[in-house]
C-alpha cells in the first residue's frame, strides 16, 4: 500500500511540474506550488517505508533526506526569507533542483525498464541529462524569472 501511495503522489508531483511553464508569483503558481509541496512531502515520507531494494536503509533513503532539505530550503525563502535581497532567485534555484531531483528519481525507476541498455547509457539518460539540462535552465532563467515573479506578486 505504501508503494501505491508513494507512486501516486510522485506522479502528482511530477505533473505539478507544469508550474515551471506558468508565470511565477501568481495565484495559480501558489496553488500549484501547494500541490507540488504536499505531493513531495507525502512521496518523501512514504519513501522511508520502502525497503524492497535492500531490505534496510539504503542510498535512496539518503537521497530522500537530501530531497527534504532541498524542499525545505526552497520553502524557506518565500515563507521566512523575504528579507533576503535575492530571495526569489534562491527560491527558484532550490525549487528547481527539488524538481530535477524528482525527475532523476523517476529516471531511477526506468533502469529496470531497459535492462538491455548499458549502465553508462541509462545513467547518462536518466540522471546526467536531467541534471545538466535542469541546471542550464535554472541558472539561465533564475534572474529574469525572479524579477517577473516579484512583479506578479505585487499586482
Image: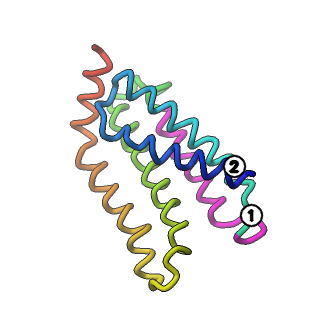
Residue depicted at 61% across the width and 41% down the height: 41
Residue 1 located within the stretch drawn in magenta: no
Most common SS among magenta residues: helix
Picture layout, residue 132 above or below residue 46: below
Q: Is residue 138 left or right of residue 31?
A: left
Of residues 73 and 45, the one nearer the viewer is 45
Given residues 41 and 135, the one toward you in this image is 41
Horizontal side of residue 90 vs 112, given as left or right:
left
Percent position of residue 69, x then y: 56, 46
**Residue ID at (59%, 58%):** 63
Q: Give the quadrant of residue 23.
A: top left
Q: Does 65 lie within the magenta span? A: yes
* Residue 130: x %, y % from top left: 37, 61
Regarding mark 1 in the picture, which secondary structure is present there? Answer: loop
Distance of label 1 from label 2 (alpha carbons): 11 Å
For disc 2, the neighbor class at 10 Å (few under 14, some 14 to 19, many from 20) is some
The quadrant of the rendering that contains the C terminus is: top left
Residue occupied by mark 2:
46
Graded by Cα atoms within 10 Å as few (under 14), some (14 to 19) or many (20 or more), the crowding at tag 1 reads: some
The structure residue drawn at horizontal position 34% and vertical position 25%, both measured from the top left corner, is 25
Residue 65 coordinates in the image, percent (x, y): 62, 52
Q: Kindly identify which numbered label has been placed on residue 142.
A: none
Q: Identify the magenta region.
A: 53-76
Q: Pinpoint residue 143: horizontal percent, then vertical percent.
A: 24, 38
| Residue that numbered label 1 is attached to | 51
First in residue order: circle 1 vs circle 2 = 2
Amino acid at each position: 500500500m505504501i508503494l501505491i501511495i508513494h507512486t501516486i503522489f510522485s506522479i502528482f508531483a511530477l505533473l505539478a511540474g507544469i508550474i515551471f511553464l506558468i508565470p511565477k508569483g501568481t495565484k495559480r503558481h501558489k496553488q500549484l506550488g501547494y500541490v507540488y509541496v504536499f505531493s513531495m512531502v507525502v512521496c518523501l515520507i512514504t519513501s522511508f517505508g520502502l525497503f524492497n531494494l535492500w531490505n534496510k536503509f539504503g542510498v535512496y533513503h539518503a537521497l530522500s533526506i537530501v530531497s527534504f532539505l532541498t524542499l525545505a530550503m526552497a520553502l524557506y525563502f518565500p515563507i521566512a526569507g523575504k528579507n533576503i535581497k535575492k530571495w526569489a532567485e534562491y527560491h527558484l534555484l532550490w525549487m528547481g533542483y527539488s524538481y530535477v531531483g524528482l525527475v532523476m528519481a523517476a529516471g531511477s525507476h526506468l533502469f529496470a525498464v531497459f535492462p538491455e541498455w548499458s549502465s553508462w547509457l541509462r545513467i547518462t539518460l536518466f540522471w546526467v541529462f536531467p541534471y545538466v539540462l535542469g541546471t542550464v535552465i535554472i541558472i539561465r532563467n533564475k534572474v529574469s524569472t525572479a524579477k517577473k515573479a516579484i512583479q506578479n506578486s505585487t499586482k
